[in-house]
Image (cartoon, rainbow, N blue to C red):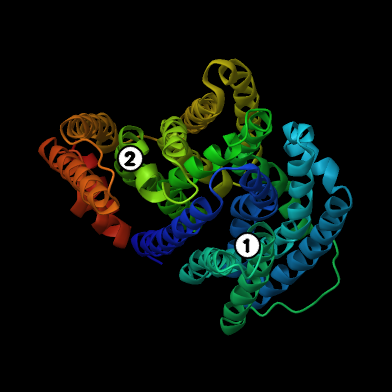
Amino acid sequence: MHLYKSIATVGSFTFASRITGFVRDALIAGILGVSGITDAFFVAFKLPNFFRRFFAEGAFNAAFVPLFSGILVSSGPVAARLYGEKVFALLLLALTGFVLLFENFMPTVVFLFAPGFQGVPEKFQMAVELSRITFPYILFISLASLLSGILNSMGKFAVPAGAPIILNLTMIVALLMAAADWIAPSTGLAWAVFIAGVLQLGWLWIFCFLHGMDLKPTSPRLTPETKALIRLGVPGAISAGVIQLNLFMDMIFASWLPTGAISYLFYADRLNQLPLGVIGIAVSTALLPELSKHIKGGQHDQARYTQNRALEFALAITLPAAVGLIVLGGPLVALLFERGAFTSGDAQATGYTLAAFSAGLPAYVLIKILSTPFFAHQDTKTPMKVAIAAVILNFGLNCVLVGPLSYVGLALATAISAWFNALTLGSFLLAREWLVFDTQLKETMPRLAAAALLMGVVCFVLQLLMPFPLATLMRIGVVGFWIVTGCGVYVLAARLMGTFRFKELRKFLQNPAPVMKDLHNQENLL
């Protein structure tokens, strides 16, 4: 499977998911605005998604994919399918018990996640009721993530990457029904989350069946292989979910702030997630199987070169994206969300929060990429320790910044702790020589930063010259002009600086072997 095709596939479907997510969030903003109802729903929505990063994406990206890929390569698809059945049975048993436990103690769980709600009994009770509806989603989406890991290991990236679109479409239908007064908005959205989990699991199971991975029911039992998954998965889940840990901490602090703080953080994070999802998830999802194969085959030079190009590709996108969201965040929020119950004041508050989150955007993506070599070497403890240190730092920064900066301080603390996480992971990789910066990357990084900063200056000047209009159509034209001009300045500056070799990168991603051979020949001549 060519790396370029894998990244493009995952990235395009993730982009489609984010676009449908924006439609969903715009409808939520227009119908519900920023209120106690939205705060309560966002807590209920975040609760299962928070744990999903641990039981699902974190654990299986870190441990399941390398182990399943190894069995698939060494022992064939039948042995891999049997291993998948054992893991599925264990996960089903563990998560069923987990869901039943949390359902029983949901008031305590909501209090731990949003202690500030205790002072507003109506909001607290609504959060409890909605969370009881949404929480089983963790069971369905975690099992769906296991099936996604199986398909990714087989080189099938499109179907898993498209599964989140089902959630967005289901919630959009519920919102349209709420707008027509057919259902209550809050409970309708909560049930939409539940139903979407069932649909996503069914969608992925069908395609696993079609590709010969129809997992049959089996009794859960611990085997050496499943014990290895648990040993690797627990620390891997913690390290992969560090951003969610920090966002969870932000929500705890925000629950003590005036009504709307949680909603501002949610809407800002949604915009920040677009480049994070399209680039970070796409690159790391495609990179992990590739690195695992290179390392298992002893192709360490090729593994390092692959990492350098992945870093180069990610920075080329995330640096200008971060600068753009910082400079144009306010107008973007106003364009996307300011209508109906979502006021201009809400847009301004969300824009400030988005700018703070975006300062850490390259770091969020780098964490995913720099964690991948550890996972490929089946070392999940080091990223876990770094993640724990980052969470502790984030807690300290929250305590310091929440007073003077309120919810914006919470977002800024998350960004700073993400940079600490990324830089620490990078230093460990360099020390172990699991990552070696080549000359091309060393020359590229500062030039990319310079091109992105130039783009930011141009966008800032454009805002001074062209005030943000009130009419929606005029806003679309003005913001579109700012974005297109900024992107043009960035690409032109990058080309003039000789920064990013687009043709060479694409050639490598499509077929790395010839490029690697040329690279070695050049090094021998030097």
The residue depicted at 63 percent of the width and 18 percent of the height is 399
Q: CA distance from mark 2 to mark 1?
A: 35 Å
Residue that mark 1 sits on? 145
Residue 468 x %, y %: 25, 38
The residue depicted at 47 percent of the width and 52 percent of the height is 281
User: Who is closer to the viewer here, 293 or 471?
Assistant: 471
Label 2 vs 1, first from the N-terminus: 1
Question: In this rendering, does residue 169 appear at all?
Answer: yes
User: Who is closer to the viewer here, 513 or 140?
Assistant: 140
Above or below, 75 against 129 in this view is below
Residue 226 badge? none
Image quarter hosting the C terminus: top left
Q: Residue furthest left?
A: 496
Q: Answer few, some or many: residues within 10 Å of disc 1's Cα (few below 14, many 20 plus, some between 14 and 19).
A: many
Question: In this rendering, does residue 294 appear at all?
Answer: no
The residue depicted at 35 percent of the width and 33 percent of the height is 326
- Give the quarter of the image for residue 112: top right
Above or below, 151 against 253 in this view is below
Residue that mark 2 sits on? 331
